[in-house]
Amino acid sequence: MARGKLRIYLGAAPGVGKSFAALGEAHRRRERGTDVVIGLVETRDRPRTAELLDGLEQLPRAAQPGGGPGELDLDALLRRAPRVAVVDDFAHTNTPGTRNAKRWQDVDELLNAGIDVITTLNIQHVESLNDVVRQITGVRQHETIPDEIVRRADQIELCDMSPHALRRRMSHGNIYPAEKIDAALSSYFREGNLTALRELALLWVADRVDEGLALYRGEHKIRQTWEARERVVVALTGGPEGETLIRRAARVAARSRGGRPQPSHLMAVHVVASDGLAHPLPDVITGQRKLLAELGGTYHQVIGDDIPTALLEFARGVNATQIVLGSSRRRAWQYIFGPGVGATVARESGDIDVHIVTHEEVGRGRNLLPPRPGSLSRARQVWGWIIGVLGPVLLAAALQLPMTAGAGLTTHVLLFLVSTIAAAMTGGLWPALMCAVWSTLLLDLLFTPPLYGLAIDRPGNGIALAVFILVGVLVAFVVDLAKRRAMQASRSKAEASTLSLLAGSVIDGQEPLPALLRRIRETFGQRSVTLLRQEDSGGWTNVESVGGAPCESPDQADALVSVSDSLALALHGHVLPASDRRILSAFATHIGMALERQRLARDAAEAKRQAARNKIRTALLAAVSHDLRTPLTSIKASVSSLRSVDIELDEDDRGELLENIEESTDRLNSLVDNLLDMSRLQTDTVQPKIRAVGLEEVVPATLIGIPPHTVHVDVPDSLPRVRADAGLLERAVANVVQNAARHNPPGRPAIRLSASALGDTVELRVADHGTGVPDEHKDRIFEAFQRLGDAPRGTGIGLGLAVARGFTEAMDGTLTAEDTPGGGLTMVFTLHSTTADPARGGAPVPPAAAAADQGPSGASPTAPDGASSET
């Protein structure tokens, strides 16, 4: 069964019309005769959205144990098996106890069943943008979805609306109820927030479109540049001028898009020549890569014998619009060998603009780089043939001069041998062989009696000429062999340089699988690289691919290498020589290591989660078996005594038994509350209702049940209000106070509960005078089911402080432990005041902002689109 297709309507903020657009698409498909079913749509009491549900089949929601609105009935939808299902709110977190924790997992099951899905998503729920959204809005998003899941969508359509239009919709009551409008407009829906979120959405979708464009160009083998977006490629040689070029290219890229360059806009490439051209010094290239990363660019390395061709091939492969090169470092006399890389690239670049940037190293040569070990360029080959052909002629003419008339044949032979060696050193084997043969003929014609003929009248002269041509040939072969060995060493050096870069990134875990595949494609100049997995049925599936049309099976590959028993790396573009297959195998090994590293990381994370769950289960079982049984046993004994007809009880005895029942019931209630609270914290279902809270509202309630005169309260009325949930703060402080009361021995000073303002925060301190806690245990006491040795059995199950810290952190505060002067332990609550909000860079918070973060029902401003800020 073919996998279904996923269509996502993406928006920058609630209210831009995602659900409306999704339902409109459902109506269009139904009118075309497609079987469409509404799995779940959140209308949020918006009349126009609700009207679009008319005429569409809707499945009832699955009933929830708590009586909530209900979740998607996944099993019913799978049984119904429509062609298309509409499932709203892609990033929604399901109610605990549901089969899948996240709604996107429900959608994945539908897609695997061959059902097409239409869904909606806000940009703030994309995992990679979570921190950015929090910096912009000051609201933390707990409902997030991995980027990979979103990028797998077959279609992503942006529902765009200007901030002004969205705020106007809000003020007209088309998004939120009237009682929430003012609060929302003054906080989350401020124009600056909406503008920033809109830009995030547009850029994210633009990157997605860019990926689709690259795939299309690869599939259709389009090599010309499409200037849909400015992309700048800077060419690096490994010399010290690279930093100047990178900074200049970054400015070009920034001007092209009006801001900081993105990795897709600025790329640096270093061409490593397989024939032995200079390699970069490690410290130089490392510094340049670091600078490039700071400026928002990416580093690439390719192997190519012809630097201009390799550079232009790379630039066209990434659809670059501009190339930045440095002015040539060659000295003036070296231009006789050719125009240089810059001039060649500028001449052959076509529709790609080329910038030649001057720098301090111009004309200084390349002495800072390792010398060329023995490869022969085209210029050297030309000069070798010139020496091999013209050298003997010029030498013969010079030996005809009167001043050299007295030289014998031996001298002539040695001089011509020098010419042969010069040709071999300059041009290699064939020019040297030519020079040796040509020199032998000239020696025989011009310097061996009888002259001007091929005949030799003396055997000694014949031997001399034979030895000469033999020595010339041997010299040519020796020089050529040295050249080949040098080329092999240079090739190995280029391969080692490429592999060292790859190995470093794999060991550090910095590059995901697509990045490794892109490096392989760039290194070997292929059109596409695909990682294939063999299924049990014998077929092949595409695990990951980059570039153009991927290979669907090993038969379509131009180069194939095994990664593991079930994985193979397929390259499509051109057949690789045997020398390249060796380094390709090394790449495959690195991919296998990366995949194994990912698997081990997943297994370790799962093992850690399983160990934590087992630890909690064991502790909970111990708590139920002892700590919860103790008050139950006490209640049972007291009730049995009261119901007994065999024992006469006076009023004092009956009162004592009733008091024992009440105390045990309170203790049992407290234990159960802490267990439930810890469960909520572990499942991330705590949803604070943040508002401006005065400590005078909270502190009196935390002292209920505490014996009088055991706590001294010092909370000034002049303190600013704090941003908190009154109920959660009360529970947290009460747990800490009760814990202090248990550990403050009789006869010691009373527990001190004090508060003070410190900058933009308020500190609430609870100090006891007990035995205190060692420094190494100050963090451990906040772990669940942890009790130190001085805690008597039956006084609790070690959840009070864990719950207190969890509630405090849910309100964006902190709870820490300090030593009390004179002995004891002080618990310090640190909460943000309403005078400034650190998430907004310390800017003053508008009067309505404290209430604006949560609506009257306790939901955040994003809640109407199912995007609660705290889940």
Image (cartoon, rainbow, N blue to C red):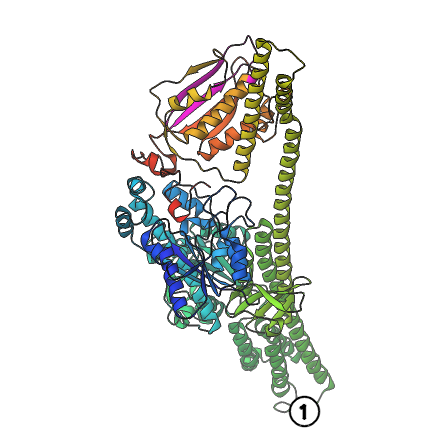
Determine whether the residue tagged by mark 1 lies in a helix, strand or loop: loop
**For this rendering, which residue is in front, 252 or 638?**
638
At a point 49% along the width and 28% down the height, the residue shown is 815
Image height of 302 relative to 136, above or below:
below
Is disc 1 surrounded by few (<14), some (14 to 19) or many (20+) residues within 10 Å? few
Residue 587 seen in the current view: yes
Whole-percent x, y for residue 264 in the image: 43, 58
**849 horizontally vs 66: left or right:** left
Q: Which residues are magenta?
A: 742-769
Residue type (three-letter) at the residue carrying disc 1: Ala
Image height of 802 relative to 207, above or below:
above
Whole-percent x, y for residue 62 in the image: 50, 50
Residue highlighted by disc 1: 455
Whole-percent x, y for residue 817 in the image: 52, 24
Name which quarter of the figure residue 475 lies in.
bottom right
Whole-percent x, y for residue 732 in the image: 48, 27
**433 horizontally vs 173: left or right:** right
**For this rendering, which residue is in front, 184 or 150?**
184
